[in-house]
Image: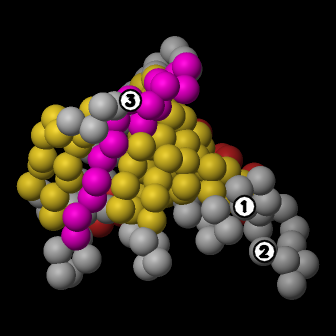
Amino acid sequence: MMRHLPLLLPALLVAALPLRADEQPTLKVSAMLHSDGTRTETTTNLEANTSEEKKLDAKGQQISRILFELDEQKTPMSGTVFNAKDQPVYRFEYERDPFGKITEERKFTPAGAFAQRLVYHYNPQGRVSRVEAFDAQGNPIGTTQKTAPAKPSQRKSDRRTR
């Protein structure tokens, strides 16, 4: 239990804040402990329309961080990926269809230059079936045939804490 305390403490602090009956929480915190000892901590600020996802190693050192900007529906519309030293690696933007599914992802260098475009295709069940990658000049650089992996909360080897 003591080793899970750092994971639970932020959530307990947020949960302890009183809300009026008509209020919704503006800060949501969750943590996922993975079977390899790493963990993912997510903090979503609904008021600021941002979400931050940190991946930490078993010692609590940052592996990577993603800062998402959220739209009105509180889904990611863009973000920046940071490395272990908290330096930006690339920025991305999502394009979505009317149902909210990501149809395109555009990646940019930290300096803002367009670098890559990913186009997502879905099967009849609504899962990603193929991803096409294009370089900055629009040349195809690869296609991946796949089925989307299970969401982290659906993996049996992971435990979720809140």
Whether 18 is drawn above or below 55: the answer is: below
Which amino acid lies under the numbered mark 1 shown in the image of this protein?
Leu
Residue for badge 3: 115
Observer-nearest residue: 43 or 34?
43
Residue 29 to residue 112: above or below:
below
User: Is there a contact, CB below 8 Å, between mark 3 and mark 1?
Assistant: no
Q: Position of residue 104 (x, y in %)?
A: 37, 55
Let me know if residue 88 is in the magenta part.
Answer: no
Q: Quadrant of the C terminus?
A: bottom right
For the residue marked with disc 3, what is the amino acid?
Ala
Residue at 20% x, 49% y: name it: 132
Q: Which numbered disc, 3 or 2, marks the residue that appears first in the sequence?
A: 2
Q: Residue 24 shows which numbered tag?
A: 2
* Range shown magenta: 107-122
Specify the label residue 73 is tagged with: none
Residue 8 x, y percent position in the rendering: 59, 50
SS class, disc 2: loop
Q: Amino acid at mark 2?
A: Gln
